[in-house]
Amino acid sequence: MSKTATETEQAPTPEDAAAERLSTAPVESDGPTGIGALGWARWMWRQLTSMRVALILLFLLSLAAIPGSLIPQNGQNQFKVQTWKAQHTTVAPIYEKLQLFDVYSSVWFSAIYILLFVSLAGCIIPRTWQFVGVLRSQPPAAPRVLTRMPVHAVWRTEADADQVNAAAHRLLRKRGFRAHLSGGAVSAEKGYLREVGNLLFHLSLFALLGGFAWSSLAAGTGGKLMVSGEGYSNTITQLDDFTGTRFYGSQDLDPFYLKLDGFTSKFQDKGDQIGAARQFTANVEYYEGGDESKLRKSTIEVNHPLEVGGSKVYLIGHGYAPVVTVKNGKGEVVYRGAVPFLPQDGNLTSTGVVKVSDYGDGPDGNRTQLGFSGFFLPTAPLSFEGTGPVSLFPGDAAPELVLNAFAGDLGTDSGLPQNVYQLNTRKLTQLTQDGRPAKARLKPGEGWTLPDGYGTVTFEGYKQWASFNITHRPGNEIALAGAVLAILGLIGSLFIQRRRIWVRAVALPGGGTQVELAGLARSESAKIAEELAELAVDLQDDAPASEEDEGEDGAEEAGAEPDAVPATAEAEASAPAVPADQNSKE
């Protein structure tokens, strides 16, 4: 009976272990690392650069990014942040302390990706040097006992041993292996692109994090709302809001001029998705620098920004701006303009205020101010009974303006900042008409005579407005390139197999030559066995099996036990598995 592997095979030598090692990850010793501060420092460094901690940090980074997607961010839209704070007054101070409105520039988020930086660097640098050393060295020498490998084949031939080794060396190089002939054996290795892909994946993650870090340190975001026909210069005084970073401030804004010529919006007017947006297009004019002769026309759509200099202008919002004219009791025009109203639902039911701070003297002869709050309804219902002032459709099928009137002190002369979209009624008195609060429903072209001789309000018509986000993020291209390269590296590391093949032809004392082939792959795959079988078939032209060996094969088929068994199942079962590398980040 045949003997087991533990009885017939010798213990693997250090050279054999080196030949079986297919990873370029640095080998870490299990010996003592010392005591005291130095020992703890080594232990913490090894933990930080381990695969386990890297995965934990990646997981924490993905979790930390979730609040940035669910909670409005100051760097994206400060108005949404202010609106969210007004609607959630209880938790807003807590979120402010936790930096949840500035997630991507927060201390805790920065700490996570800095640790991930260090972890990746601690893996990439030594691994790269080890891989360079492998490329510069010859393939590992053949182990003493090739038959202990998981995949092997043995046969006898009458060909000369040196000729067999030379033929194997030629065939392996033809197949794209790095082959080396020495010591009566051929060592060959292939699949280095697997490790290249692995290193590329790690380097790409490093670039991805680097691009993200650079964009956080050298990015700036501004917001601007414009009514059709309005324009602005990209300066800090004309932006509605601006958020800079350490290396990008208001003095670094790209110089350009942008004007909103018009806005086109289309909505589905029938079917199951009635009211769904089908087109949002802002028609703009712009020029870079201060040269108006370079004026150009363009369009901005959702997810299709306008690139001006080093900035991108994104379309982020749209609504209606009623055009209102207010006259005092003497018939003098004290206010005229388009006032943006902010949408509150999918049908663009919009709220807004009109502040008349230069009204002058009121009917009682005292200086006063007027304020109007209300709704703009693109498609108003026939009656508000049961529903209140709500729009039935986002398109302007039946526009109406609903207003309430107030008189008193708006607080605009106090010097304190206030929200232009809200009316502080603390020092205002609502006007009354017939014992009820004064209010009116106006269609385009209609007017309203205010009670107590305060004058008139006329709803002249309406325009459309658009809000834009002007961003400067220099690290986006780096992050995108890193993401693409990471995918390519991952594909290479998953689908390319690192494998080694050894061939040894030894002259036998009684005459003839014994040919031994063995293969080793990092993953359990049939490809190495197929490749070894193809090599054995090709080698038959130079080293054909002897008749004696063929006779033994026939005896094996009849039930006899041969002297040499080519890759038997018993040998594969008894051979040791490819040693796992606990330090690898593959």
Image (spheres, rainbow, N blue to C red):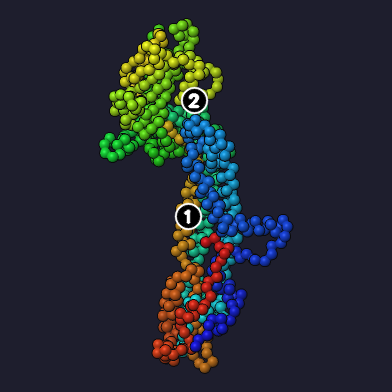
Residue linked to disc 1 = 485
Viewer-side label of 1, 2 = 2
Badge 2 amino acid: Asn
The tag earlier along the polypeptide, 1 or 2, is: 2
- Does the image show residue 569? yes
Residue linked to disc 2 = 419
What residue occupies the far left of the structure in this picture? 270
Residue 67 in picture, x, y percent from top left = 50, 42
Q: Is residue 108 left or right of residue 159?
A: right
Report the Cα–Cα distance between label 1 and label 2.
46 Å
- Does the image show residue 292? no
Tag 1, which secondary structure? helix
In the image, residue 207 above or below residue 86? below
Q: Badge 2: few (under 14), some or many (20 or more) residues near its Cα, within 10 Å? A: few
Tag 2, which secondary structure? loop
- Which of the 4 image quarters holds residue 124? bottom right
Badge 1 amino acid: Leu
Residue at coordinates 53% horizontally, 49% vertically from top-left?
A: 61
Residue at coordinates 56% horizontally, 41% vertically from top-left?
A: 105
Q: Is the residue under label 2 in contact with that under label 1 (CB below 8 Å)?
A: no
Residue 373 in picture, x, y percent from top left = 42, 21
Residue 214 in picture, x, y percent from top left = 55, 44
In-front residue for pair 565/52: 52
Q: How many marks?
A: 2
In the image, residue 61 above or below residue 134? above
- Which of the 4 image quarters holds residue 451? top left
In the image, residue 506 above or below residue 407? below
In-front residue for pair 559/266: 559
